[in-house]
Image (cartoon, rainbow, N blue to C red):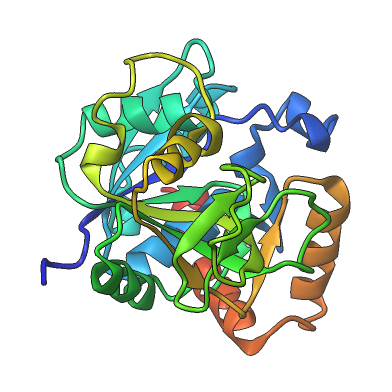
Amino acid sequence: MSLFPTQAIVLAAGLGTRLRPLTNEIPKPLLPVGGVPILLFNLYLLKQAGIKNITLNLHHQPQKVMRLLGAGKSLGLNLHYSLEPKILGTAGGIAQALHQMKPITTFVVNGDILCDVDLRKMYQRHQEARALATLACVPKDRAKVESFVEFSESGKIFRIAHQPPSQFSWPKLQKGIFSGIHLIEPKVLQNYPTHYPGCIIREVYQPLLAQGGCLQTYFHSGAWWDLGSIEELKSVDQGLWRETLSENILRQWKEIRTWSKSLFYRS
């Protein structure tokens, strides 16, 4: 068994159109929830798992993110940035970031989620399945979506967002929502065109499934929110201040507030 991954990508290039007008002046990753920029929840999740080498892809107002975080030294992290003058989407953004990273197994985390996914258990599942990629999924009722990840009892993925087409020989499939956290092997994107915009689901994962590639799920039943809408951002913000969310998330929130003080109170 290989060693636990030492690097990750946090996707933070989005325009945050559903969060306007909040994102007119503040890039989505820096919007506060519980008084803490969303992005810090994801950086802390990775740091707690032992991952300190992190690349962030940026497009919308990148200088504000870079000015706040710098090289990550005060957070105990080693941060790098992959700048996108033209937004590249998830496939292009990940491919460009990987180009400047080691060719090893890499976690990828959406920069606008908040969760308590156990990354070490996820990696264990990935290794056991010998998967090209493992997608953390949450129950299908966690968000209002029409596209799901469909997988067998063992967690093997057969379809994502209705593709490839259904086949009668498949086992009975369960449905889940892709959480925005995945674990990928470097060869998954090794042939993806440099600087080519695209969606990793449509351009990479669906073709891999059609070719018989092994994709796996890690099912997460704990806390998870997609903070891409004002309604959800407000709901989670209130849940933190009122301390009505799960103990795991409240503990994480309090630890992050202490951990990140140096970013906001510099001498």
Q: What is the x, y in percent for residue 138?
A: 63, 69
Observer-nearest residue: 164 or 170? 170
- Direction from residue 189 to residue 2 in the image, left or right: left
Residue 260 appears in the picture as rendered: no
Q: Which residue occupies 52% across, 37% down? A: 12
Q: Which residue reaches farthest bottom?
A: 247
Q: Position of residue 260 (x, y in %)?
A: 47, 60
The residue under the point 26% across, 56% down is: 52
Observer-nearest of 108 and 27: 108
* The one of 165 and 10 positioned closer to us in this rendering: 165
Q: Residue furthest right?
A: 231
- Name the quadrant of the N terminus: bottom left
Q: Toward the viewer: 258 or 154? A: 154
Residue 246 % position (x, y): 68, 85
On screen, residue 152 above or below 149: below
In the drawing, does residue 80 fall left or right of residue 146? left
Picture residue at 22% right of the left edge, 60% below the top: 5
Q: Is residue 138 left or right of residue 94?
A: right
Q: Is residue 58 above or below residue 225?
A: above
- The part of the image, by quadrant, that contains residue 18 is top right
Determine whether, in the image, residue 71 is placed left or right of residue 237: left
Q: Is residue 199 visible?
A: yes
